[in-house]
Amino acid sequence: MARLAGVSRATVSYVLNNTSAVRISEPTRRRVQEAAKELGYVPHAAARSLRAGHSRMVLMPAPNVPVGPLYSQFLNELQWALSRLDYTVVQYGGVGLHGDEAARAWAELRPVAVLVPGGGLGPEGVHILKRSGARAVVTLGPERVEGAHALLLDHHGVGHSAGVHLLAQGRRRVGVVIPQKPGLEFFAAPRLEGVRRAVEDTDATVTELPLAYEEEAAARLAARWRSLALDAVFAYNDEYAMLLMRALQDEGVGVPEETAVVGADDLMLGRLLRPRLSTVHIELPSGQDLAELVDRVVRDPGGVPEVHEVLGARIVHRESS
Amino acid sequence: MARLAGVSRATVSYVLNNTSAVRISEPTRRRVQEAAKELGYVPHAAARSLRAGHSRMVLMPAPNVPVGPLYSQFLNELQWALSRLDYTVVQYGGVGLHGDEAARAWAELRPVAVLVPGGGLGPEGVHILKRSGARAVVTLGPERVEGAHALLLDHHGVGHSAGVHLLAQGRRRVGVVIPQKPGLEFFAAPRLEGVRRAVEDTDATVTELPLAYEEEAAARLAARWRSLALDAVFAYNDEYAMLLMRALQDEGVGVPEETAVVGADDLMLGRLLRPRLSTVHIELPSGQDLAELVDRVVRDPGGVPEVHEVLGARIVHRESS
DNA sequence: TTGAAAGCGCTACCAA
DNA sequence: TTGGTAGCGCTTTCAA
C-alpha cells in the first residue's frame, strides 16, 4: 500500500484518518487515496484497536430464542442510535456458552461496552468483562447484577396489570398460562407472580395452566376447561392468548361471558381477533435512551452503577375481558 | 501475566493453548494457570488474529427489518452448527451502510467468512471482501452475485404455488397484496411475479393491492373490495392475510365463498383463524447445511462458486381457499 | 524445558 | 511536509 503510493506507512495512516495534527500536501493525499482505491485497501480493525488499546465495539450476546417484533424494533433503534454515536454494534452468537465462560468469550473481543439481555450474567462475569477493558456493562433483565448498570425489565408489572384488571371486571377465579417452551421461564415466572400479588388479600384464586404452543395442547386444556371453573385467564402473551381463545371458542366456551381472556405485548393480531383481545401493553426502553446511557458510562466509567426501572405495563381493555 | 507466574510470555502461550509441539512441566503449567485465573486473564482476540493472519469469525450483517420465527430459527440452527465447527458467529449491526461501503466496514473485521442475507451486495463488494481475506462469501438472496457462493432464495415459487393453487380452485381474478413496509419489496416483487407466471396463458388476471400493515388501510381496501371484483387474493404472507381476511369478514365478504385467501409462511396463526388459512409453506435451508457449505469453502476456497436453489414452497390447502 | 525475539497492521511520537 | 520507529498482545521459530 505504502509502496504503491511511494510514501511511508505513516503518511498513509495520516491521509486515511484525516489526521488534523499533520498537514499533508494535496498531491500526496491524492496519490495515497488513489492507491487505496486501486488496491481495495481496507484498514485492519484488529490492528487498529490493538494499537489504540480500545475499540468502539458494543457487544450484545444474541438471544437464542426467537424474538418478537417488540425486541426487534428495540434492537434496531439501539443500533441506529449507537451508530450515530460512532459505535459499532455486534451481536455475538454464542450458543451453548454459559455464565463466566460466556463472559470470557465476550471479553476476548475487548468490546468497549457489553449489553446483556436476559439473566445469566453473574457478578464474576461482570468483573471479568471490566478487567478486560469493558468500560460499560449493562444488563437488561429481571434483576440487577453487582457491578453492572441495569435496565430492570421487571415482568411482575405485566401480570399485575392483568390481575388488577380482571379483578376490577369482577372475575375471581383466574387462570395463568405458563408457556412450556424452554427459555421463557424467566418471563413467565414473574408474570405469574405479578398476578398472584394482584389477587393477594382478596377472595380470588390463581391457577397455573402449563401450555405448550400447539393446537392439540390447547384443545386438551379447553376440553377440561369447565371442570377448572375459571372465569378469567391471563394467557402469558398475545400469541398464547390467541391459541387458547381459539380452543375455548371451538369448545363453546363464551369469551368474555364465561371466561375473560387477557394477553400481553399488544401485538396487531390482538386487534384482529373477535372478540378483540384485551392485552397488556408493554413499553420497552427506547434504544435512544440506552444508547445515551452507554455513551455516558463509556465516557465516565467511574460512576456508581445506575439502575433504571424501564418496563412499563398498562392494560389495554378491549372486548375479550 | 507472565511476570506473575515468573515465566516468559511464550510459556504462557504454550500452556493456555495446550501447544502439543512443546512439553511444559506440570509445576510450571500449574503456576501459569493459577496466575491466569487470579488475574482474570483473557486472551486478546485481535492480537491473536493479527498474529495468526486469520480469524474464525463468520460475519453476518444483521437484517434491519423485524424477522419472523422462520428466520430466527434458521439463524439459531446456523449459529449452533457453526459453533460446533469452531467458528464464531457475529451479527454486524450496520444500519445505514450500503453497498461497497458496507462491504468495507465488514472487511475491516477480517472475517474468515461472510454470509449476506438479502440483496444489496454487488460483485465489487464480494471482491473487496475476498481481497481482505474472507475465504467464503455466501449470499442468501434472490439472485446470485458474481464471485460469491449463493443460496438462492427465489420467492417466485411462493407466488407461483399460490397462483397455481388458486387457478386450480377455479379462481380467475386474483389480487396480490403488496406490503408497503419498506424493506419488503425484495420479497414482494418476486412473489407477485410468481403469481403472474402462474396465470400466464390463462384467462385469469392479476391485480396489485398495495396495503400498509394497519387496520384502517385494510378496512379501506375491504370497503372497495366488491368494486374490484376479485375472487381470490394472495396476501403476501400469513400476517397480511390475517389482516385482510379480518377486514373482508367485517365487510361481509365471504371467505372463501366470495373470495379465496392464501397466505405464506405457514405460521401457527393461520391454523387458528376461521376459516383456517390456506398458506404457502416455506422451506428454508437448514442451518446445518449452510454451516457445512461455509466450512467446506473455507477449507478449500479455490472452488468454483456453488449456487443452490434452497427455497422450497408448497401450498398447504386449508379452508380459506 | 524454557526464554529471547521477530513480526502481524496500525498509529503516535519525534526527527529530518 | 514527510519518514523512521516503537510498541499494542500474541504466537512461533530458534537458541539456550
Image (cartoon, coloured by chain):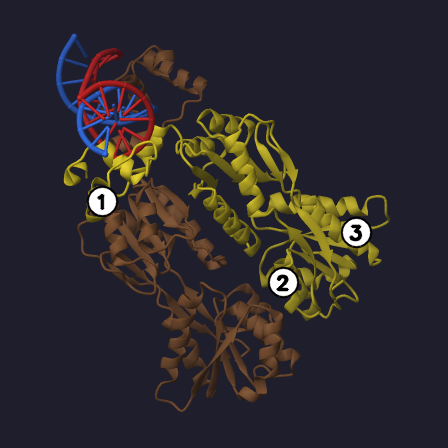
Chain colours: A yellow, B brown, C red, D blue
Residue at mark 1 shares a chain with residue at mark 3: yes
Instruction: Name the amino acid, label 1.
Output: Arg
Q: Residue at x 40, y 66 (%)?
A: B186
Residue at mark 2 shares a chain with residue at mark 3: yes
Counting from the top left corner in percent of width and height, residue B13 is at 30, 22
Mark found first going from the N terminus, 1 or 2:
1
**Position of the C terminus of chain A by quadrant:** bottom right
Residue indicated by mark 1: A30
As drawn, A203 above or below B32? below
Q: Secondary structure at mark 2?
A: helix
Can you tell which mark lies on residue A120?
none
Any part of residue B137 in sight: yes
Q: Are marks 1 and 2 in contact (CB under 8 Å)?
A: no
Can you tell which mark lies on residue A164?
3
Please state the chain letter of the residue tagged with numbered disc 1 in the rendered image.
Answer: A
Instruction: Name the amino acid, label 3.
Output: Val
Q: Secondary structure at mark 3?
A: helix
What's the distance in space between the residues labelled 1 and 2, CA to CA? 64 Å
Tell me the mark number nearer the camera, choosing from 1 and 3: 1
Counting from the top left corner in percent of width and height, residue B63 is at 43, 54
Residue indicated by mark 2: A243
Q: Residues within 10 Å of mark 2 (few under 14, many from 20)?
A: many
What's the distance in space between the residues labelled 1 and 3, CA to CA? 69 Å
Please state the chain letter of the residue tagged with numbered disc 2 in the rendered image.
Answer: A
Instruction: Name the amino acid, label 2.
Output: Leu
* Residue B224 lies in quadrant: bottom right
